[in-house]
Image (cartoon, rainbow, N blue to C red):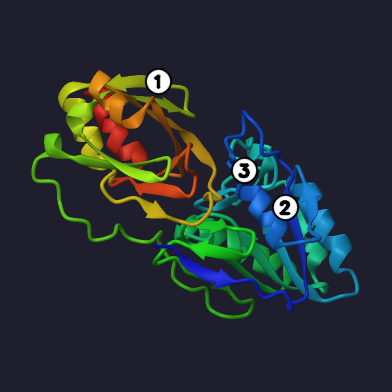
Amino acid sequence: MATPIVNALSIPRCVTIDRAPHAPGYDDKGALEGDRIYFSGSAANSTPHEAIMNLVNCSRGKHVECIIAGHGQVGAIACGGGVHPTDDQLIAEYVFWNHWKDDIAGLRGQATMVTLFACETGASSWGLRLLDSISKLTGVVARAPTGMVACTGQVTMYEPGSVMQVVIPGQPLPQPIEVPPTPNYPPWSDPPSARLRLLNGQHVVELGANHIETLEVVHAHGYTFHLSGMQLAKALSFIRFAYPIDMGAPLMSIASGTVILHPTVEGRTLLGSDREFIICGQRYLMDAAYPSIVYRVDPPFDVAFGVLQRK
């Protein structure tokens, strides 16, 4: 279960949010809409330049916390494009031209803190480097979550084990914080016996591996492949379908692709149709039909499915 954090409306702040619409082609499922309700009165942006200028203009003469909200991944936050940003829409240390750095220095003397509100942005050495750069350029505390986050419009929800990585100017740099570890799920003793628990209307439907004919992976890197037989059984052991997690709202994660379950004829009597899941970062699948429900992938997606693809 995700951990709720109640909105503290009394805290002065300036907020800007990716203006990408909740529309077909973005697969956003309402994550940014929840942000816009939660951070009422926020500005909108489509690029890092626009996001930062929104904060510079809002914070002038006010000395407030400045927040950029959008979809994220380890070491990066999208300032446009929704779940499918281009490199020039990212604030990230690993984008080689670092096009946002001159702009964000404009917050020096105005912001009291810079928060990047997105999934996993503060995690690992990449997240730490990003926050260190922002803190040095602005002269204030920079922080970002190390795990998955979601926003209902009333509260924000943090993945269990997620914390804020915080960099304080003038203080020794903290140690990198990795994404939250895999929950202590029971190990798979027999992959073909894997159970899947999927929401269907108001009821949870339980299926077995024998109810799934193929699993189709459409990855953002450009490859598509279908798994069946023992490859399918192994793939179902990587995805913890027996343990649905209710985040309370869609994840604020950059999408890496989609996974589609194609049921057998018998499976369709239980599930009704194919079921699509959005690959969130490297560690979760979000149910496209019920986007508050996510499933953990272990090992991480590229590792697990890259191995299967090569076999």
Residue 34 point in image, percent of width and height: 64, 54
Residue lying farthest to the left in this orientation: 189
Find disc 1 in the rendering and name its residue.
Answer: 224
Residue type marked 3: Phe
Q: Earlier in the sequence, mark 1 or mark 3?
A: 3
Q: In terms of secondary structure, where does tag 1 sit?
A: strand
Residue type marked 2: Ile
Residue shown at 64%/59% (left/top)? Answer: 153
Q: Is residue 190 above or below residue 174?
A: above
- Left or right of 204 on screen, residue 13: right
Residue shown at 58%/55% (left/top)? Answer: 118
Q: Earlier in the sequence, mark 1 or mark 2?
A: 2
Asked whether residue 145 appears in the rendered view, the answer is no
- Left or right of 187 on screen, residue 69: right
Residue 101 sits in quarter? bottom right
Q: In terms of secondary structure, where does tag 2 sit?
A: strand
Residue 219 point in image, percent of width and height: 44, 28
Find disc 2 in the rendering and name its residue.
Answer: 17
Q: Residues within 10 Å of mark 3 (few under 14, many from 20)?
A: few
Residue 96: mark in rendering? 3
User: How much space separates mark 1 and mark 2, taking CA atoms?
Assistant: 32 Å
Q: Residues within 10 Å of mark 2 (few under 14, many from 20)?
A: many
Q: In terms of secondary structure, where does tag 3 sit?
A: loop
> Where's the N terminus, which quadrant?
bottom left
Q: Are marks 1 and 3 in contact (CB under 8 Å)?
A: no
Residue 20 sits in quarter? top right
User: How much space separates mark 3 and mark 2, taking CA atoms?
Assistant: 24 Å
